[in-house]
Amino acid sequence: MTRLRADDICNVNAELMDYNQQLVHTVGKSLAEIAVHSLNKKLEDFAGRYDLYTVGVIPVSCGEGIISGFSLTVQKIVEFLGFRSFVTEDKDVGGLAEAVRKGANIIFLADDDNFVAINIVSGKVSDNGEATGRGYAAALDLMAGGLNKRTVLLIGAGPVGTGAATFMTGRGARVLVYDIDGDKVEKLRQALPEAEAASELNEALVQARLIIEATPAADIIDQKYIFQDTMIAAPGIPLGLNRECKNIIGGRLVHDVLEIGVASMLFAVLDE
Ligand code: 2YC
């Protein structure tokens, strides 16, 4: 899993409004609408219930330590979505106790291996990997006008790719899966037998016009595989497209470093 650096996230908060507008323009839906779509719900299903929640974000110092701006960025995304939220002043266990004392009923926290949202009343838990994959697949579904009977190439069969594949097979897509580690493809296919293994990446890229790029590799998609009708949803960090590819793909690309994942986590832990 890629570890974010402070300069990956330092502009997220200032650009949230613009990013949301960009999503409305390219995907046709807002950040919140993409997140609820990933749960096969509608925004109105949550209307009038936002006030029931208070979200506490807790900095965690273990392992490689706190990433400057990480907790604040998560909190600002949650706030942008319309929820009362705060970053605890304390970190780790003290921060968890502070969040509960201050009335948080949802908490977000991340160490080096896990980033989760927890509804401490209902016990619902959402993992960033699954939620990010689900959110990006939902964005692709919306951008493509529906994935039913469409072929989608999933590059990367880790937790994010698996979350995406689960959503896409649920929507009737034919999912081709490539990963440099064949064992990961087999593991995904054990959970999702309808997914098909793609043995050779460039061969698969010729067939697919819809792509989920969920790898930590940069520059993984050669520009000769970006066609006029190619659409790419790319949760992978860093983005797997070089500058030429980005110029060709234009507005048919969805990529961010935290926004869709955090939004998809949040709505996943709200009460039904
Ligand atoms: O500031 C803190 O609380 C740190 N403990 C946060 C560490 C996050 C490490 N994980 C990541 O950077 C990536 C993110 C893309 C989300 C999931 N893993």
Image (spheres, helix red, strand yellow):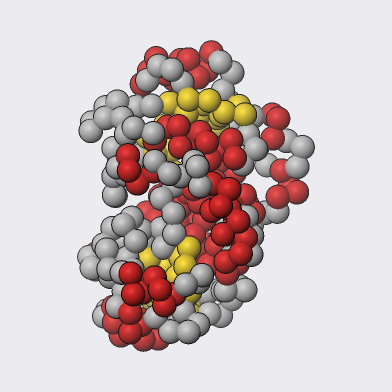
User: Above or below — where is 87 with respect to 207?
Assistant: above
The residue nearer to you, when weighing 125 against 206, is 206
Q: Is residue 90 left or right of residue 181?
A: right
The residue nearer to you, when weighing 17 against 82, is 17
Q: Residue at x 36, y 21 (%)?
A: 92
Q: Position of residue 72 (x, y in %)?
A: 45, 32
- Can you tell which quarter of the image residue 204 is in? bottom left
Could you tell me which quadrant the C terminus lies in? top right
Q: Position of residue 64 (x, y in %)?
A: 23, 33
The residue nearer to you, when weighing 229 against 11, is 11
Q: Position of residue 53 (x, y in %)?
A: 64, 29
- Can you tell which quarter of the image residue 208 is in? bottom left
Q: Residue at x 47, y 37 (%)?
A: 74
Q: Residue at x 36, y 58 (%)?
A: 236
Q: Position of residue 125 (x, y in %)?
A: 49, 38
Q: Is residue 16 left or right of residue 48?
A: left
Q: Residue at x 53, y 40 (%)?
A: 77
